[in-house]
Image: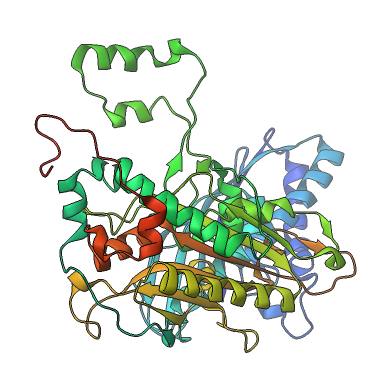
Amino acid sequence: MKFDLKAEFELSKSLPAKAKAQLKQLLKEADTTLFKRGCPKGKEAEAGHLKSFKLSGRKLQLHITSGRYVRAHACASRLKNLLAKNLGKDFHIGLKSLKTISYSITLPAKKKADLSLAFVKKLEWKKKEAILHLEELDLEEYEALIDKLVSLFHEKTSEKPQAKEHQREVWYTGEKPMATTENISETLERKGWVKHFAAGIFHYMPPYTKLMRYIENLMLEEVAKPLGFEEIVLPKLIPLEVMRKKGQLTGIPEEMFYVSEPGKRDLKHFEKYTDYVKLTGDVSPEKLQTFLRPPRYALPYAQCEPFYEIFSNKITDIDKFPFKFFDRSGFSFRYEAGGKSGMERLNAFTRIELAYIGTPKQVKELRDSVVEKLKQVLSSKLGIECRLVETTPVWLAHSDPNAEVQKTDVIGTYDIEAYIPNRGGRKESEWLEICNASVSFDKYHARYSIKERARREAWTGCSGIGLERVVYAFLSQKGFDMKNWPAEVKQALGQLPAPPKMLDWPKET
């Protein structure tokens, strides 16, 4: 590991001859003593070294190199303090500024890799080495970043096996009769049960909404409430710092929606934009962006992100656990619809999110109880052919792909997947995930600074029920003819309301 820094000090005024002599002495002292301070004995060759310097008027240019000990930026910081103290005391000359001209780090690398790194403006590959040419920053910024940057480089170039997604079926309803193989997304729109609004976003019309609300209430009455979950309302405008703690910003930034505030809460600030819209009729997102602040919030991806903030920097008492909450108050948002126009992949969708914190035993038992209740509702009440799959925990995939999947023999995540007959046969087709239930172990305690009064181990868990996906699976298997629906569902729903009818919509009445 090698560090190579070229920097420039600007003095408050030019040095007189006597001060120049003292400067040379100070630089010699720094090179022989100051740059070696704190270096392990026998490792002095890897400490800092002043390769050269040049004084031109009020500018002092320095070239400092080092190995892993007393790194070049730390040497420059020490030298800054030394010069400020001595030149200021003896000659009343101060240091006005310190500018980085160039800074590079040479690291061992087995082979070239296709990667990019923040704060690195150029990455140069040589035989068994990589040279990171850094952006020009302040010394304090280098101090805070260098170790993390080196670790990130090694993480990205490491040949350590990545945690791979795995699946193992642990339960199956068995085959159930299918009433249809039609494309449900197309039929939903054709019948007017949903109406396309924007990419991955739909109006839910009366018949669809009534069925979805029935399933929602069924889940609450048969799953959440019998297990003692209490309803809360979680925020839906989430600061980016919370998303960082959850792991979303480093694991799935490409799948989230971000929110910007107005540049000013003043109509005058937007006058040029509003005039443009009035004159052209063009909403021009590009122009609008110039009147907005950079995004500071994101919309909920998993709905549970704010849950952990309830306990952040607080002292909990394990004797009062578990705390069990559910939220059904609004949409979750994921940029996953892509080019698909149907209901399988949505940018905005509704969920019931169950979130809980407790002892390891409580969390495991609660998660397993949620799974058992979901199996009963889906299989017996709704008659959906589905299976339970042990899979890679979603929190692992999002926030720490190099971590161990399991800390214990407790399964991290179960997904419940439904067979979709329109996709093909049971063996070869992709099944649709409709619910999941996870144990997150103690992963979020450190991230959110959740403390227990006696430092006893506590875990968290969460379970998501995708309402649109359950509806999609139900209709994909049962169709739209209610004679093929379970008797309990038909009795509870009665006659479904009709969608509104216009001259040219819906296509099928």
Is 35 placed above or below 503 here? below
Q: In the drawing, does residue 304 fall left or right of residue 330?
A: right
- Please tell me which residue is depicted at 25% across the width and 62% down the height of the picture: 483
- Please tell me which residue is depicted at 17% across the width and 53% down the height of the picture: 187
Quarter occupied by residue 383: bottom left
Quarter occupied by residue 486: bottom left
Q: How many marks?
A: 0
- For residue 256, say whether it is visible: no
- Please tell me which residue is depicted at 52% across the width and 41% down the height of the picture: 297
Furthest-right residue in view? 454
Residue 308, position as x, y percentages in the image: 67, 56
Q: In the drawing, does residue 476 fall left or right of residue 167?
A: left
Residue 8, position as x, y percentages in the image: 59, 47
Tell me, what colour scheme is on the image? rainbow
Q: Between residues 296 and 466, which one lies in front from this camera angle?
A: 466
Residue 191, position as x, y percentages in the image: 17, 46
- Please tell me which residue is depicted at 31% across the width and 65% down the height of the picture: 473
Residue 151, position as x, y percentages in the image: 57, 72
Q: Between residues 130 and 402, which one lies in front from this camera angle?
A: 402
Quadrant of the image for the C terminus?
top left
Quarter occupied by residue 422: bottom left
Quadrant of the image for the N terminus?
bottom right
- For residue 74, say whether it is visible: yes
Q: Between residues 43 and 87, which one lies in front from this camera angle?
A: 43
Q: Between residues 486 and 270, which one lies in front from this camera angle?
A: 486
Is 243 placed above or below 391 here? above
